[in-house]
Image (cartoon, rainbow, N blue to C red):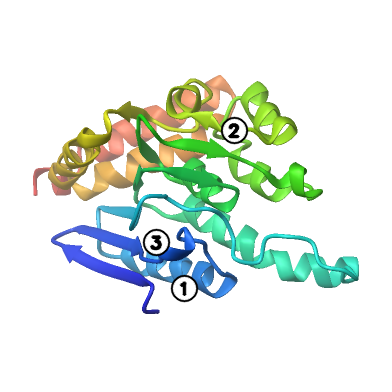
Amino acid sequence: MDNIRTEQDGEITTITIDSPDDGNRVSDEMAAHLAGLMQQASEGSKAIVLRTAGGDFCLGRKTMGRTWPQPEALESREKMSMVFDFYDTFRRLKIPVVAPIQGRTSGFGCAIAALTDITIAARSARFELPETSHRIMPTAAMSSMVDRVSRKGLLYLSYSAQSIDALNALAIGLVSEVVADDEVEAALGLVVENIRRMPMPAVFAVKAFASNAAGMSIDGVNDYAQNLHATVNTSSRMRE
């Protein structure tokens, strides 16, 4: 797609949504294409940088809004399956996705920000879930955040439909770090360069542990951590 660019720098893949005149809104076709690009990149890269062009990160889905008459429930569910498949792509990837966030991030864009593994936000960035103000149930976007964002933060975003600033987004777990607007690229570079230096088994193991441990008992967490620690740290690939 002309509005999605991919660049390769060694073992780091950068995917850029380049539709600034449309607020980098994502169509269903774009989301499916993005999912495919991320899956492809995960086969040979250590990290994916997912970014957008222009002043705003992403103002949502192109098709957001209610139309009448509404389709039947089964048709509606099938149509929305693309969105949930896109969300699940982030969770299935074996490598981290890092996103620098600028400007406004709304709806589907806010979901993307939550789903990325490391999210570096400019201090002036704003985040919102405006669905309820449009008489739309926000549970699709909420599903992307339920294991990322605090319950109180998620309910505030959903019920208020108000935007929050980057520091509040940090407080509720929506972003990883907040830096001055002119320091985003430097902060991104520090994270990416450290991942670049990591052996691939360690890259996989960190993502696997973070993805799986939260749903385990503490005994299971301890066993899983010990197994990964012993298996990965003794691997000859850690010296490559």
Give the residue at mark 3: 20
Which percent across, then down, holds residue 137?
79, 47
Residue at 16 percent across and 47 percent down: it is 196
Residue sitting nearer the eye, 154 or 46: 154
Which percent across, then down, holds residue 126?
48, 36
What residue occupies the far bottom of the structure in this picture?
A: 1
Which percent across, then down, holds residue 130?
67, 43
13 sits left or right of 170 in the view: left
Of the residues shown, which amino acid type is indicated by label 1? His
Residue 91, disc: none
Residue sitting nearer the eye, 79 or 51: 51
Of the residues shown, which amino acid type is indicated by label 3? Pro
At label 2, counting other C-alpha atoms closer than 10 Å, the crowd grade (few under 14, some 14-19, many 20 or more) is few
Which percent across, then down, holds residue 2?
36, 79
Residue 33, disc: 1
What residue occupies the far front of the structure in this picture?
A: 21
Give the residue at mark 2: 215
